[in-house]
Each structure stands twice: as C-alpha cells, then as structure tokens.
Amino acid sequence: MVSSADICIDIRSTVTDINRDLAATLKTCGPAILLLPPQEGSSGPNTDAKNNVINEITTTLLSILNKNHACQRDMGEFDDDDAGADSLDESSEYDWLVIETALDAIVCLSAALGPTFANLWPTFSKSVLKFVSSQESAERSAAVGSVADCIGNMGEAVSPFTGPLMKVLVHRLTDSDPETKANATYATGLLIEKSGNEKEVMSSLGAVLGKLEPMLGADGRVLDNAAGCVSRIVGRYPQRVPLDDVLPRLVEILPLREDFEENKAVWGMIIQLYQRSNPTIGNLTPQIMPALEKVLGPPEEQLDAELRGQLMELVKYIHSRSK
C-alpha cells in the first residue's frame, strides 16, 4: 500500500524536475522560450502571449515560494504507521528542493529577461527575501545567492531597490554560515557596482567596508568574494576608498584560490588602475608580478579567454615601463 507520505514525495519530486527543466530551458534558450508564434495576420511577436507565459510562470513560482502550490499541500496527516520518521524526513527534504529549484528558475528567468526583470522583482521580492532570514543556513545561502544573481542580471535596473536590498545584504555580511556570508559579500559587491542610486550606496559604504576588512583575513570563498567586493567598490567609487590602505591588503591575498569568477572583478580593477596611472598600484608592481605569473599559469579555468588576453597585455605594458 502506498502511503500519503510517499504520494506527497512523488508529487514534489515531479514539480522539482519541472522547475529544473524550466531553469535549464530558460538558460539555454533565453527569452525565446517566452515568445509564441505571431498571431494570424500579424508579422510581429505575440507580445500578449509572452506576457501570459511570464504571468503563468510568475504565479506558479510564487505559489511555491509561499508554500501554496498544490504539491505542498499535505494529503491529510501522515496517518500511515509504517511511514515513520524516515518518510517525514524525506518529505521535508523534498519540501526544500521544490523551493530551491523554484529559486533557480527565478534566477534563470531574470537572466532571460535582463533589465526588464526589474518589473517582476517587486512581485518576487518579499517571497524571496523571507528565505534570506531563514533559521536554516542552507536556505539563507541559496536565497542570498539567488538575490545576487538577480542583481547581476538586472544591472542598473536594480537601482530603485537599492535601499531595501542593501539593508538585507549588509546584515548578512556577518552571518555565522560561511556560504551565506560569501554569497552576501558577492551580492553586495554586485549591488554597489550595478546600482545607479549613489545616495543609497554612499549611505552604506562605510558599514560595508568595515565589515569587509576582517574578511580579507579569512579563507576560502569568503576571502575571494571579499576581494571581489572590494574590487567592485574600487572600480566604481575609487575616490571613496583609501587605496593606500586597501590595495596592499588586496594584492597580498592574490591569486584567488577558490572562486575564480571573482578574478574578473579583481584583475579588471587592477587593469583599470594601471590605465589611470594610479601611483599606488604602480608602487605595488613588484608584488603584483608574482600573482600575475600564477594566475596566468595552471589551472587554466582561473581566467576566461578575454581576461587572459587582457592580463597578457598588462604584463607587456609593465615590462615596457621597466625598460
């Protein structure tokens, strides 16, 4: 006999798979998946149908985040004596998987829509951000990571939401969970880099820099994401950062060892300062050269092709100056 618990698990497993398929399709096809063929007699895209598809996706994902989806309604109490604690534990695991994959789908939707996702963020915001304050570290980490990706995908369109997002993220910069802290650091750097709301950014910049300072003595992803966050701040607001104090600390921890995606922010900022003939970065050249040698060496996944080419040009530039 199939228990109620097993039926619930099967349904949630199916919805989890659908969320994964949606995320993968959005990632592969981009906004094309949201477009239906033109209506008969029309030469343009069926924008009404596109809006309907987005609305349906949004409604479904919201119902999951708010735990109102049909798959999240328990089929009565688990009255099967044989189900026991194991079934309850497995059901709880699938409860979170449904939500986690819904968050992934939202991220992929934001990637597909780009800046226009800002029109949907107010709809998702409350439901996503409640998981940022969850008592469960895995839920906080996943939610903060999703917020970070949505910020990056919205770009400057995130500006109207800078204040509320900054408040939530700055609080998570001291999270007890390293993964959540690392994700919050990454998200904060992206928000400062992308937002056009300079007033809100400036009001929080001191607090952010204060919380980043001890992270530059950490390790793992926290250290790499702290380096990326500092680099994004310097790249966007160099006049607001004490470069004589910050840059030596930053160069000292190079090369990054875990989160190679942050190399684009870190080395991009360094290249930018060399292009501006910044005297502080110039004086740090003896310390930068060994880091350059290591980051240009194995493993190759440290750098993408574009950044690798830019750093090789930087090496040539530094050598030309020393002649």
Image (cartoon, rainbow, N blue to C red):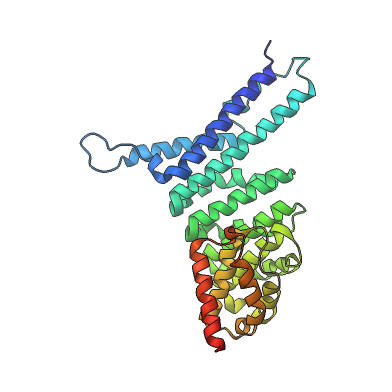
The image quadrant where one finds the C terminus is: bottom right
Quadrant for residue 64, please give it.
Answer: top right
Position above or below: 178 against 276: above
Frontmost residue, 121 versus 218? 218
| Residue beneath the point at 51% across and 80% down | 275
**Is 210 placed left or right of 189 in the picture?**
right
Frontmost residue, 15 versus 115? 15
Residue 273: x and y in percent read 55, 78
Residue 196: x and y in percent read 50, 65
**Is 100 placed left or right of 119 in the picture?**
right
Q: Is residue 58 visible?
A: no
Position above or below: 2 against 153: above
Quadrant for residue 261, please give it.
Answer: bottom right
Furthest toward the left, the residue is 41
Frontmost residue, 47 versus 108? 108
**Is 30 placed left or right of 179 in the picture?**
left
Residue 264: x and y in percent read 56, 64
Position above or below: 195 against 276: above
| Residue beneath the point at 56% across and 43% down | 104
Q: Is residue 160 visible?
A: yes
Quadrant for residue 52, please give it.
Answer: top left
| Residue beneath the point at 52% across and 48% down | 122
Furthest toward the bottom, the residue is 323
**Is 34 placed left or right of 146 in the picture?**
left
The image quadrant where one finds the N terminus is: top right
Position above or below: 126 against 227: above
Residue 115: x and y in percent read 45, 54
